[in-house]
Amino acid sequence: MQDKVVLVTGGARGIGAAMAAAFAAAGAKVMVTDVLKDVGLATVETIRQAGGQADFVEHDVRDEAAWEAAVAATVRNFGTLTTVVNNAGIEISAPIAELPIEVLDRLMSVNVRGLALGMKHGMRAMRPGGAAGKGGAILNLSSLAQLSASPGTGAYAATKAAVDRLTKVGAVEGGKFGWNIRVNCLYPGLIQTEMLEGLLRQQVRMGFFQNDEQVADYVVDHTPLGRLGTVQDIANAALFLCSDLASFVTGVGLSVDGGIALT
Ligand SMILES: NC(=O)c1ccc[n+]([C@@H]2O[C@H](COP(=O)([O-])OP(=O)(O)OC[C@H]3O[C@@H](n4cnc5c(N)ncnc54)[C@H](O)[C@@H]3O)[C@@H](O)[C@H]2O)c1
């Protein structure tokens, strides 16, 4: 990743922070962006302490002007932009019959609007004539939720299905328009982050399980590899899809879930 400049949204913590650290360890220059300023700055400091090159911009992915500023700051600081990782996302559970419509709007706004803006401004910067102009790669975070159907996950899953479709169409456009921009997505299974803790609590609150441990045990029992995922599992797959090892890979949705989607 020596010649790569990567912008990672939602990079302050969780999967985003692990991907940012993995890219930097592999030699990339990384722009961490997030709404969580202090956490984001701490993540960048950790990467720098480990010898990596990273910077932070405060950035709400729902805001188009903030996208323009984040891309411009990346090109200004690091000379170019080769890779956009649309990782920022939120998860809120509710059975469809109980779904407050403003919850659906919030999910759509971060997970779909924010991600589509990331694809738009990533493509505009990386396509010929753009501020970076040399092609590149976009990686989107979809989810196991778009492949499966668990009670309470309908609205979240709908946003992640939208991410999947945006990825496939983006891959065709990024190739056919002659831009040499690859677009792929990941379908993470259940990965140990603050988001997962929230999801387990909501499953209990909705009455589907007695306690958090019972949900986790259920997931592990249904996972052929017999464990929850780690942020490093996702970072490793992201590293592959964003590197030149994947130079002929576009339009792919890669499951990183210990096999749970099969069961
Ligand atoms: N953890 C899992 O089990 C899991 C499974 C499948 C997919 N995913 C997806 O992976 C991605 C990362 O999830 P995570 O588990 O690390 O979650 P997380 O909640 O730990 O981290 C998400 C990050 O996104 C940031 N964010 C939220 N809204 C934002 C906004 N409007 N603008 C900018 N940043 C914003 C948060 O501040 C946070 O730093 C998400 O898109 C999520 O849907 C996670």
Image (spheres, grey):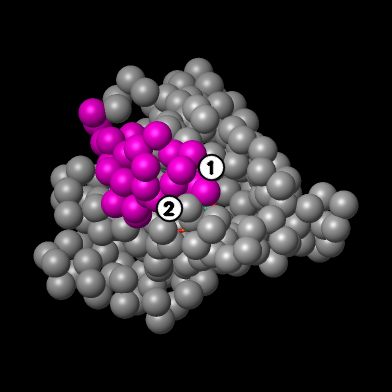
Which badge, 2 or 1, comes first in the chain's sequence? Answer: 1
Q: Give the prevailing secondary structure in the magenta stretch.
A: helix
Q: What secondary structure is marked by label 1?
A: loop
Using the image, tell me which numbered label, if any, was put on residue 160: none
Residue count near mark 1 (Cα–Cα under 10 Å), binned few <14, some 14–19, many ≥20: many
Q: Nearer the viewer, residue 1 or 134?
A: 1
Whether residue 238 is in magenta: the answer is yes
229 is higher (above) or lower (below) than 123: below
Q: Are marks 2 and 1 in contact (CB under 8 Å)?
A: no
Disc 1, ligand 1: is the CB inside 8 Å? yes
Looking at the rendered image, the disc whose residue lies closer to the viewer, 2 or 1, is 2
Q: Residue 230: percent from the left, percent from the top?
A: 34, 53
Specify whether tag 2 is near ligand 1 (CB below 8 Å): yes
Quadrant location, the N terminus? top left
- Label 1, on which residue? 143
Residue 164, given in percent of the width and then of the height, sits at 58, 34
Picture coordinates of residue 110, whole percent (x, y): 63, 57
Q: In the rendered image, is residue 218 in sight?
A: yes
Question: Which residue range is magenta in the image?
Answer: 218-245
Residue 191's label in the rendered image is: 2
Density class for disc 2 (Cα within 10 Å; few <14, some 14-19, many ≥20) is many
- Structural distance between the alpha carbons of marks 2 and 1: 10 Å
* Residue type, label 1: Ser
